[in-house]
Image (cartoon, rainbow, N blue to C red):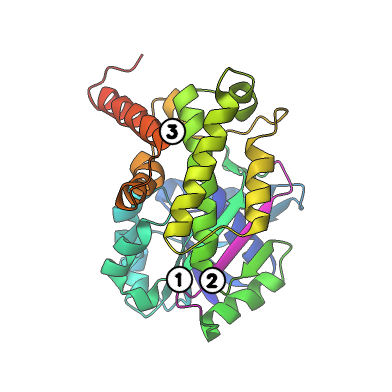
């Protein structure tokens, strides 16, 4: 299998690196500065699953546009607000008949990818990992979680997703060749949007929220609401998902927070529309009241307005 990975940051660098480490033909589409870094120092991963320094193949956007290559899979890892430029970057590879495997949070990106490349060329994907690209180019993965799921959105078991499964089989990554990848994606956004909403609304991690008056009720309410939305959309959460979500979000000893809180605290753009606004639209369509999501979305949009106007501290 030949894979193109957009970027060599946290998610793309980690999963693409593990595939390259196990012998898969992987090329990283990177900016000139990151390309020079990789050529000089290699792709470096520090992880409890094993450290690695890898000599990897790279290409920049100009080189790919001038000399399109044949890839079986294009692994797309970016923030939703960078999706348009990301699609432009991978377009030369997609013209050769590749399938794109997006690892964005949420679900809203599927419609945009379908419109650009055709639904038949867009797989479904979801991952769970805490990983950071350090200033020196090292990818740090501090805990054992490194889970990834992928599959055809029509629930078929295709040759291309089986080829991907065969490649991941040679790695130490926890992976799933899902028979219903959109179920995986709905379960993730149902959990993730609660975490993002309460983190940003209360500017605190889950343990701090749970210790505050009304905190447990807010998290529990938001979680039940999201599961109702998913159920009405035809994707009721499986029992294991419900158990996992409640154990993670309602553990008073936990300190869970998501990167969107870091974005707000650092004055960066957020994925508010993609993660919270999209789900809130579904709640409205199903006539479901979602007070926590609604307040969090208002909070984030007000933050974005202040950021755009240059009025952040």
Q: Measuring 30% from the left and 52% from the top, which residue is drawn there?
A: 285
218 to 49, vertically: above or below = above
User: Would you name the residue on which mark 3 appears?
Assistant: 292
Local packing at callout 1 (Cα closer than 10 Å; few below 14, some 14-19, many 20+) is many
77 to 312, vertically: above or below = below
Residue 256 horizontal side relative to residue 183, left or right = right
Q: Tell me if residue 262 can be seen.
A: no
To which quarter of the image does residue 172 belong? bottom right
Residues at circles 2 and 3 in contact by the CB criterion of under 8 Å? no
Name the N-terminal-most of marks 2 and 1. 1
Q: Position of residue 291 (x, y in %)?
A: 40, 33
The magenta-colored residue range is 142-155
User: Would you name the residue on which mark 2 appears?
Assistant: 180
Residue 57 horizontal side relative to residue 176, left or right = left
Q: Position of residue 187 (x, y in %)?
A: 54, 55
Q: For mark 2, give the secondary structure.
A: loop
Name the N-terminal-most of marks 2 and 3. 2
Q: Is residue 15 magenta?
A: no
Distance in Å between CA atoms under marks 2 and 1: 11 Å
Residue 302 horizontal side relative to residue 262, left or right = left
Which mark is nearer the camera, 2 or 1?
2
Q: For mark 3, give the secondary structure.
A: helix
Q: Tell me if residue 235 can be seen.
A: yes
Q: Which mark is residue 246?
A: none
Q: For mark 1, give the secondary structure.
A: loop
Distance in Å between CA atoms under marks 3 and 1: 31 Å
Local packing at callout 3 (Cα closer than 10 Å; few below 14, some 14-19, many 20+) is many
Which quadrant of the figure contains the C terminus? top left
């Amino acid at each position: 299998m030949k894979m193109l990975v957009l970027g060599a940051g946290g998610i793309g660098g980690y999963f693409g690196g593990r595939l390259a480490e196990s012998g898969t033909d992987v090329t990283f589409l990177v900016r000139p500065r990151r390309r020079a870094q990789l050529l000089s120092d290699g792709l470096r991963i520090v992880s409890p699953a094993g450290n690695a320094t890898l000599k990897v193949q790279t290409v920049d956007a100009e080189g790919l546009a001038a000399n399109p290559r044949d890839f079986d899979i294009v692994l797309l890892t970016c923030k939703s607000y960078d999706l348009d430029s990301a699609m432009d970057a991978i377009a030369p590879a997609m013209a050769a008949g590749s399938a794109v495997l997006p690892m964005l949070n949420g679900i809203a990106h599927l419609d945009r990818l379908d419109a650009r490349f055709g639904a038949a060329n867009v797989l479904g994907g979801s991952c769970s990992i805490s990983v950071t690209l350090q200033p020196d180019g090292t990818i740090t993965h501090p805990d054992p979680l490194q889970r990834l799921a992928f599959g055809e959105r029509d629930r078929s078991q295709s040759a291309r997703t089986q080829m991907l499964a065969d490649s991941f089989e040679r790695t130490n990554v926890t992976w799933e060749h899902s028979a219903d990848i959109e179920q995986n994606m709905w379960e993730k956004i149902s959990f993730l949007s609660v975490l993002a909403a309460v983190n940003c609304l209360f500017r605190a991690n889950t343990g701090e929220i749970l210790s505050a008056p009304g905190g447990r009720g807010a998290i529990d309410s938001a979680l039940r609401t999201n599961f109702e939305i998913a159920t009405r959309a035809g994707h009721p959460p499986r029992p294991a998902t419900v158990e996992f979500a409640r154990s993670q979000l309602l553990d008073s000893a936990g300190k869970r927070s998501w990167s969107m809180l870091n974005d707000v605290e650092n004055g960066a753009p957020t994925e508010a529309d993609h993660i919270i606004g999209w789900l809130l639209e579904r709640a409205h369509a199903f006539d479901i009241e979602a007070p926590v999501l609604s307040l969090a979305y208002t909070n984030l949009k007000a933050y974005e307005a202040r950021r755009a106007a240059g009025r952040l501290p």
